[in-house]
Image (spheres, rainbow, N blue to C red):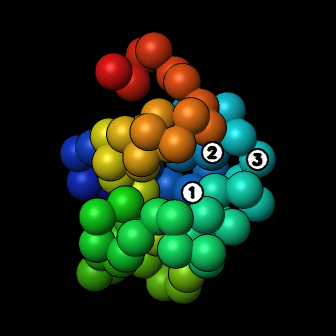
Amino acid sequence: MSTPTGWLTTNQMAETLEVPRKDLLRMRDDGTLKLGCHYAAFKGKTYSRDSYLWNRRAVQKTMNKQGQVLVSSML
């Protein structure tokens, strides 16, 4: 089953943002990134919290607002 358009795995999202995977998960756990908007579970694709898929544009927008990262290829 392919990944829905615009959504990335945790490892892909961390690599795209050039942040450690643990920092991405920390932002999920501390509420910086929200379920539904920034990350979601997809039937047949997500089996645990570690396999959520990430909305590339929503995460990038939030992180840019917070001044945490700027990846020009995502704009």
- Contact flag, marks 1 and 2 (Cβ < 8 Å): yes
Q: To which residue does mark 3 refer? A: 20
Q: Residue furthest top?
A: 72
Instruction: Give the CA distance from mark 1 to mark 2.
Output: 6 Å
Q: CA distance from mark 1 to mark 3?
A: 10 Å
Viewed as shown, does residue 69 lie left or right of 20? left
Residue 40 at what x, y percent from top left?
A: 35, 71
At x 48%, y 84%, the residue is: 47
Give the vertical position of 14 relative to 27 (above or below). Answer: above
* Sequence order check, earlier mark of 3 and 2: 2
Residue holding disc 1: 10
Q: Quadrant of the N terminus?
A: bottom left
Q: Could you tell me which residue is drawn at 50 percent across and 55 percent down?
A: 9
Q: Determine the image quadrant of residue 65.
A: top left
Q: Which residue is mark 2?
A: 14
> Along the line of sight, which residue is nearer the eye, 36 or 2?
36
